[in-house]
Amino acid sequence: MKRLLPIVICLIAFLSAQVSAQQQPDISIAAKAYMLSDYQSGQVLASKNAHERVEPASLTKLMTAYIVFSALKQNRVRLDQVVPVSNRAWRMIGSRMFIEPNKEVTVDELIRGMIVQSGNDACIALAEAVAGSEEVFVQMMNQEAQRLGMKDTHFMNTTGLPHPDHYTSVHDLTLLAAAIIRDFPEFYPLYSLKEYTYNNITQPNRNRLLWLDPHVDGMKTGWTKTAGYCLITSAKRDKRRLISVIMGTKSAGERSKESQRLLNYGFQFYDTVHLYKKGEVLTSIELWKGSQDVFKAGFNADVYFSIPKGQADNLKATMEYKQPLIAPISSGQEVGSVKFTLNDQLVEVYPLVALEEVGEGNFVERAWDSLKLLFN
């Protein structure tokens, strides 16, 4: 049978003391699609057309960068590696960093040219350096998208130039932005560079919020005639980080303004609290036929929760696990779940795992527990 137990979360009182009675307003953003999420909790704070297919334009370059960062981490390429510039890369249309076939350029320079200057030529050169061709590199992009859970996404190129089969969603771009911040903290600061000079040509970062908001430290702009003006922004205030994705605004100024409004909304009207640490003991669960009668259970990752200000008292949690649980139990084994509800609406489910390994008991202990189970 299943046993449903309430969890006594002592942090609820703490939450109540930390939040104001401010009323949470609705927000409307002038964009085709948008999403605002909390990086630590992963929760969505506001969205519109979250899974609708949209043209990613140069936001594509986040996945191009992700693949290059992975290659660097795996020592398949080096930052100081000199990359030959093919005619295809040199003649690439759209935004460029102005690489030339007869001029040396390194992987490091190409990455900066791709991120800051949004160079399409840099994307091609990097793809050829990592995978031999853009076509093979794009296959790697699509494989990585699947691994990251980007189910609304399909890439056809490394640059974001329009193609009928080149699409994504604001939900998937949020996953990708968070993955870069999480997986490559050593490279993420590149997204805060305000300008970059190569070949005696200095180009500014098109993300205006890097100048307007000191809390903004990334990430990427995009534009095509069909996609409109797009922007992925990440900002950190105190210990909180929010990620906003805005697609299809009418101007560069509007994408900056609407992104700023969205970020301000999240910081002003939500709190994010660190409820539990990884490995913290949440409860002890009864165990049958084991070398001990109970085992410790908790979470295998830090648990953060984002909640509208003034609604802390409405946050409830219940723990659900199967009984009987029979030894052996391995550390990290999923043994149940913790469900968080807000105003009686389910908002998040976290797996409950064993925090220790427990082997089988001896013959007598197993036999005795078997007998007790017959009458339980």
Image: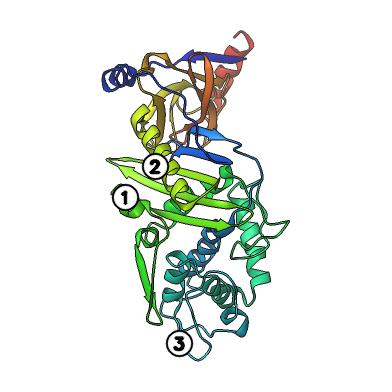
> Taking 9 as reference, is 228 above or below it?
below
State how far apart marks 2 and 3 are (Cα).
39 Å
Q: Amino acid at mark 1?
A: Leu
Q: Which residue is mark 1?
A: 212
Mark 2 or mark 3, earlier in chain = 3
Q: Nearer the viewer, mark 3 or mark 1?
A: 1
Q: Is residue 296 left or right of residue 154?
A: left
Q: Amino acid at mark 3?
A: Glu
Q: Determine the residue positioned at 47% across, 47% down.
A: 255
Residue 210, image x and y in percent? Answer: 34, 54
Instruction: Tell me if label 1 and label 2 are in contact, CB under 8 Å.
Output: yes
Q: Which mark is residue 104?
A: 3
Quadrant of the frame with the N terminus: top right
Residue 85 sits in quarter: bottom right
What crowding class fits label 2: few (fewer than 14 Cα within 10 Å), some (14-19), or many (20 or more)? some
Is residue 259 visible in the rendered image? The answer is yes
Name the secondary structure under disc 1. Answer: helix
Q: Is residue 275 left or right of residue 59?
A: left
Residue 289, image x and y in percent? Answer: 54, 24
Residue 277, image x and y in percent? Answer: 36, 35
Residue 133 sits in quarter: bottom right
Colouring rule applied to residues: rainbow
State how far apart marks 3 and 1 are (Cα).
35 Å
Quadrant of the frame with the C terminus: top right
Is residue 331 visible in the rendered image? The answer is no
Residue closer to the observer: 100 or 330: 100
Q: Which residue is mark 2?
A: 260
Name the secondary structure under disc 3. Answer: loop
